[in-house]
Image: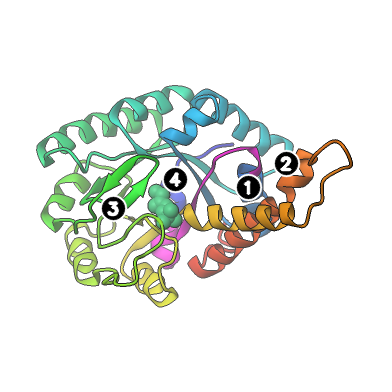
Amino acid sequence: MLVSAKEMLNKAREGKYAVGQFNINNLEWTKAILLTAQENNSPVILGVSEGAGKYMCGYKTVVGMVKGMIEELGITIPVALHLDHGSFDGAKACIEAGFSSVMFDGSHYPIEENIAKTKELVATCNELGLSLEAEVGSIGGEEDGVVGAGECADPDECKSIADLGVTMLAAGIGNIHGKYPENWAGLSFETLEAVKNKVGDMPLVLHGGTGIPEDMIKKAISLGVAKINVNTECQLAFQEATRKYIEAGKDQEGKGFDPRKLLAPGFEAIKATVKEKMELFGSINKA
Ligand code: 13P
């Protein structure tokens, strides 16, 4: 069964660990993440960007695939199916399709508009028992066509959004999607602390989980981060494993690569990456 992310995130914040959000792109990624979470008794959040949703034939297909896998793989740990960086219309479409959690990223709107749109979604999500993530201060880098300059969030704006009753808040603290540049200044813990002081117990979300040094991840968790998003690292692991397999030339005589065998090393690589992250975030045996 799909669940709202509310309970797992509140437990994580209280227990000082973080639940991983791993983005999915296809059947193999979804299966790899669900099985790893189950094997490690960890709660998990499956993230779906709007682009990945389109690629997978739309949100209804995604809901059908994930629900089918939960049943047929015997998954019993809490799983939230979450829209990542959703537009206002995208969030509504996912709610309609049966997602258990959505992110509305209104960070590029003037704060008044971000507040008005977030408020409307808070009402809908509360009515349906879904979790809602809001964003203040953009996350740097590019993800699925969404480009952010990476500005640090204004703690007062964070409080205005948190007070609307969202479940979790993504505050920009110098984090960037994808690989961090050599001259990256690191996470702004000053901003994170200021945000935490304003929003109190609200679980905070750290985007751009790929390539953040372990000590910074641990410090961020100690300061209220309860959900960490990872995408690029799974993508890189998948690509490297698939490349090696192709280079080894394990194709079948006259038939090319068996698609199931071709994707198997990438599947295992994602499992290993997800497990590593769950260990680092401290979510193992917390289901
Ligand atoms: P990375 O691609 O840097 O892991 O970030 C993922 C993310 O934040 C998804 O919202």
Highlighted magenta segment, given as a residue range = 10-28
Of the residues tagged 4 and 2, which is closer to the observer? 2
**Residue located beneath label 2 in the image:** 73
Of the residues tagged 2 and 3, which is closer to the observer? 3
Ligand 1 within 8 angstroms of badge 3 C-beta: yes
Of the residues tagged 3 and 1, which is closer to the observer? 3
Above or below, 17 against 76 in this view is below
User: How far apart, in angstroms, are the residues tagged by discs 1 and 2?
Assistant: 9 Å
Give residue 34's mark. 1
User: How far apart, in angstroms, are the residues tagged by discs 3 and 4?
Assistant: 21 Å
Give residue 193's mark. none
**Residue located beneath label 4 in the image:** 5
Q: Nearer the viewer, residue 92 or 144?
A: 144
Report x, y in % for residue 125.
34, 32
Mark 4, residues whose alpha carbon is within 10 Å: few (<14), some, or many (≥20)?
many
Going from N to C along the chain, the mark reached first, 1 or 2, is 1
**Residue located beneath label 3 in the image:** 139
Q: Are marks 1 and 2 in contact (CB under 8 Å)?
A: yes
Q: Nearer the viewer, residue 153 or 122?
A: 153
Q: Nearer the viewer, residue 96 or 230?
A: 230
Residue sitting at x 29%, y 52%: 170
